[in-house]
Amino acid sequence: MDFVIYNDVLPWPEDADGEGAFLKLISLDLDNALASSWIAQNDTSENLSSPQFESESFITFYPNPVTDILRINSTSNNINNLKIISLSGQLLTTYNFNGREIEFDLSDFEAGIYLLQIETDTDVLIRKIVKN
């Protein structure tokens, strides 16, 4: 069994305060100990035993692991913002874009595992990437 202890103050989602909203893990691939891996959710109608992560179906990125150039594609929305976050939750860099296809140079980053936060017109997706 796994559990998470959190407080409804930043960096955790503030809406999940026991007054209706609850925490929802953005992706099962993320570290549930990090606040950036969670969102506040009000809809209790979805099946919690088999979550559907719709954002994952229209955003692709490759290669992963990446050596230098990471390619990110969105089939339905413009990619507006890209953040690279360390596994400890530290924001390393933010880049602003406006497009559906991006080539992002990671050659200056040290080898390791990072969180990639992609913001589109309507969604936020957080995924792990491995930098060789």
Image: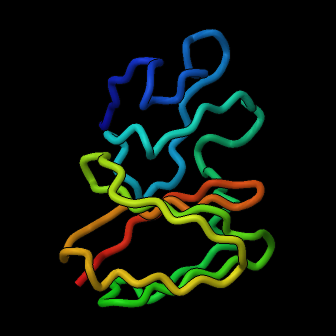
**Residue 59 against residue 3 in the figure, above or below:** below
Kindly tell me whether residue 57 is visible in this rendering: no
Residue 65: image x %, image y %?
Answer: 33, 84
Kindly tell me whether residue 102 is visible in this rendering: yes
Residue 33: image x %, image y %?
Answer: 31, 39
**Residue 100 against residue 80 in the figure, above or below:** below
Residue furthest left in the image: 111
Question: What kind of colouring is applied to the model shown?
Answer: rainbow
**Residue 49 against residue 63 in the figure, above or below:** above
Q: What is the quadrant of residue 92 in the picture?
A: bottom left
Q: Quarter holding the N terminus?
A: top left
95 or 15, which lies in front? Answer: 95
Q: What is the quadrant of residue 78 in the picture?
A: bottom right
Residue 88: image x %, image y %?
Answer: 24, 47
Q: Quarter holding the C terminus?
A: bottom left
Q: What is the quadrant of residue 70 in the picture?
A: bottom left
Q: Is residue 121 left or right of 40 when viewed as pictured?
A: right
Residue 22: image x %, image y %?
Answer: 58, 25
Give the residue displayed 78% in from the left and 69% down from the top.
77
Residue furthest top in the image: 19
Give the residue displayed 34% in from the left and 86% down from the top.
66
Q: Is residue 106 left or right of 108 when viewed as pictured?
A: right
53 or 47, which lies in front? Answer: 53
Give the residue displayed 57% in from the left and 81% down from the top.
72
Residue furthest front in the image: 96
Give the residue displayed 33% in from the left and 24% down from the top.
5
**Number of numbered discs overlaid on the protein picture:** 0
Residue furthest right in the image: 76
80 or 3, which lies in front? Answer: 80
Q: Is residue 103 left or right of 99 when viewed as pictured?
A: left
